[in-house]
Image (cartoon, rainbow, N blue to C red):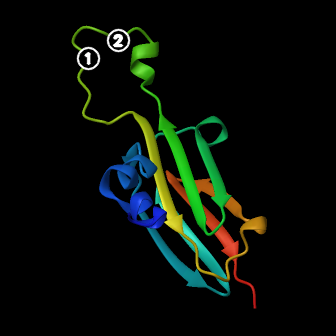
Amino acid sequence: MRPLRWVVRSAPVARLRQAGRPIRTEDYVENGVYVIRADLPGVDPARDIDVSVHGDTVEIKAIRRDNLKARGAGRGHHAEIPYGLYRRVMTLPGEADGDTLTTRYRNGVLEVALPLRG
């Protein structure tokens, strides 16, 4: 029998943990702060972005809504922009302080900042 950790990391379960379209990100440390920048154009940051810390991970979820459908566009509507749920789970550095996380959304980019302890 394999340990539970192996099951959680197995392919089908790992895919469930990352359900939703992937979010393109970059991360770096600057002046004692761990920063994640997430590419999220076309979302309303006040209602469609959720950032949460779970233990040693940070989860970013966002929904890009198809406003053309809401305005009655139907037949002949052509869209190459993907809509729906976007999600990303990232492992935090051990010294990141998840209790003091701050966010800023500007020009389609979400910036998540977590101070590093020590």
| Of residues 84 and 53, the one drawn nearer to the viewer in this rendering | 53
Q: Amino acid at mark 2?
A: Ala
Vertical side of 9 occupied by 68: above or below: above
Q: Can you give x and y, in whole percent of width and height, for residue 17 in the image?
A: 45, 51
Mark carried by residue 73: 2
Residue at disc 2, secondary structure: loop
Name the disc covering residue 77, or none: 1
Image coordinates of residue 52 in percent, x first then y, are: 65, 54
Q: Which mark is residue 18?
A: none
Q: Which x, y percent locates residue 40?
A: 47, 49
Contact between marks 1 and 2 (CB within 8 A): the answer is yes
Check the image and report above or below for 53 versus 18. Answer: below
Residue at left 40%, top 65%? 6
**Amino acid tagged 1:** His
Residue 51 in view in this figure: yes
In the image, taking residue 73 as reference, residue 4 lies left or right, namely right
Q: Is residue 40 visible?
A: no
Q: Where 40 falls versus 83 (above or below)? A: below
Distance (Cα) linking label 1 and label 2: 6 Å
Which residue is painted at 39% across and 55% down in the image?
Answer: 14
